[in-house]
Image (tube, grey):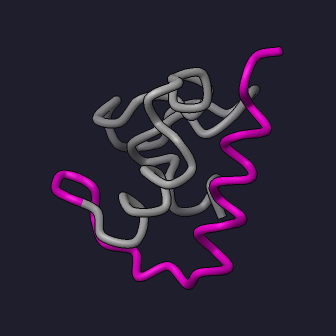
Amino acid sequence: MAARWCVSCHVPGPGMKLGSGTDVGPPFAQIAADPALTEQRLRGWLADPNPPMPNLNLSRAEIEDLIAYIRGLKPR
């Protein structure tokens, strides 16, 4: 999902290059490392994003999967 929908604005993971878009959004590893971006904040953002992020109309399951993926990128 991240490689398909998010890569145009984010670097969603290791080994993935920025897509045809720009670096409008931060890399997912940066999001994962930011203590201010709690799961609750990410959940709210993904459910009701603000421009420039498009509303992808993600289901609850998709939001939870994306948050789990992002959290998996957090440096240890």
Point out the stretch of residues depicted in magenta.
50-76
**Which residue appears at 31% of the width and 34% of the height?**
22
Location of residue 37 with respect to 15 vertically, above or below: below
Please check the rendered image and state whether residue 71 is part of the magenta-colored stretch, yes or no: yes
Taking depth in this image into account, of 71 and 18 the one nearest to the observer is: 71
Can you give x and y, in whole percent of width and height, for residue 19 in the image?
48, 41
Residue 2: quarter of image: bottom right
Taking depth in this image into account, of 1 and 71 the one nearest to the observer is: 71
Q: Is residue 5 left or right of residue 53?
A: right
Can you give x and y, in whole percent of width and height, for residue 8 in the image?
42, 48
Please check the rendered image and state whether residue 30 is part of the magenta-colored stretch, yes or no: no
**Which residue appears at 72% of the width and 65% of the height?**
65
Location of residue 37 with respect to 59 vertically, above or below: above
Residue 54: quarter of image: bottom left
**Which residue appears at 75% of the width and 17% of the height?**
75
Q: Residue furthest right?
A: 76
Q: Residue furthest left?
A: 51
Q: Number of marks in the image?
A: 0
Q: Quadrant of the C terminus?
A: top right
**Which residue appears at 52% of the width and 47% of the height?**
7
Q: Quadrant of the N terminus?
A: bottom right
Can you give x and y, in whole percent of width and height, for residue 29 in the image?
62, 26
Taking depth in this image into account, of 39 and 29 the one nearest to the observer is: 39
Can you give x and y, in whole percent of width and height, for residue 66 in the image?
65, 59
Q: Residue furthest top?
A: 76
Taking depth in this image into account, of 8 and 48 the one nearest to the observer is: 48
